[in-house]
Amino acid sequence: MTELGAFLRARRARVDPADAGLPPVGRRRVTGLRREEVAVLAGVNPDYYARLEQGRERNPSPQVLDALGRALNLDADARDHLHRLAGVTPAHRPAPAAVDPALRRLLDGYPTTPAFVLDHTSDLLASNALADALFSPFTAADNLARMVFADPAARAFYAHWDRVAEATAAHLREGFGHDPGSPRLRALVAELSGTSAEFAALWESHVVRGKTSEGGKALVHPDVGPLTLAYQAFDVRGAAGLQLVV
């Protein structure tokens, strides 16, 4: 039995038939769902499902995996795990539209360092007081990519603007890979491509890079002077696509 088969077998054993909407049919010899019941709930051939559990079928489609995830009542993490076991990239989970109140409280718990939350379009969804002060030279601290490429303050604020521009475009391209159909991201790319020749060239280079702490940031703040800041970026569990930057 493969890891995929073992996972499917273990998860069907955890599903109460009543929770799956199945009527009682007398005494059951197995815990949870039968293979045939999983197949019916997922809309797949029972023999095909049996081969998946037995390891004789190794290439289920993303659509079949999604159907099995629904049939087995898998949560988001378990569905992603199912896709990875099958060698399939998990389907994109859209980022939440708002930041959880608990995460906002965490931001305010950093009294001595700027902290903010970004989504895959580089929108600043939440920030603490020091982050607001840090980004005060910008007309609007709403989207890091727009701030870098469209706000005149950026070239004075970032001591090495060229490096920041490259990293920002590469990070946006990485976000595009997670959700290429995002209307918000496509609109942002069209906007910046029309207003910044530098962005258009960097975007067409297709360089991809996630946000890292390598090298830190050298800044020049009009009220404070030169600053060199190290930072860390953390994926937010339970909120796919969001990052906490401290």
Image: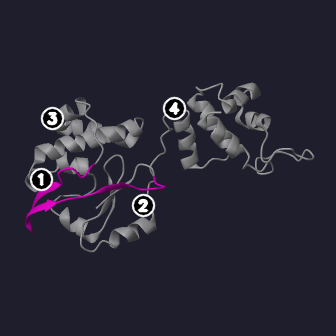
User: What type is the residue that disc 1 sits on?
Assistant: Tyr
Sequence-wise, the earlier of marks 1 and 3 is 1
* SS state under label 4: loop
The residue sitting at 21% across, 50% down in the picture is 214
Secondary structure under the numbered disc 1 in the rendered image: loop
Nearer mark to the viewer, of 3 and 4: 4
- Could you tell me if the residues under marks 1 and 2 are in contact, i.e. CB atoms within 8 Å? no
Residue in front for this viewpoint, 35 or 109? 35
Residue pointed to by mark 3: 197
Q: Position of residue 153 (x, y in %)?
A: 12, 54
Q: Which of the pair 143/88 is nearer the observer? A: 88
- State the separation of the CA atoms marked 1 and 4: 41 Å
Residue 45 point in image, percent of width and height: 74, 26
Residue occupying image coordinates x 41% and y 49%: 241
Q: Residues within 10 Å of mark 3 (few under 14, many from 20)?
A: few
- Residue at 47 percent across and 40 percent down: it is 92
User: Magenta part of the protein: which range?
Assistant: 212-239
Name the mark nearer the viewer: 2 or 4: 4
- Marked residue nearer the N-terminal end (3 or 2): 2
The amino acid on which the numbered mark 3 sits, given as a three-letter code, is Ala
- Within-10-Å neighbours for mark 4: few <14, some 14–19, many 20+: some
On the image, which quarter does residue 79 sit in?
Answer: top right
Q: Mark 2 points at which residue?
A: 99
Q: State how far apart marks 3 and 4 are (Cα).
A: 39 Å
Q: Residue at x 23, y 48 (%)?
A: 146
Quadrant in the rendering for residue 165: top left
Q: Residue 205 carries which label?
A: none
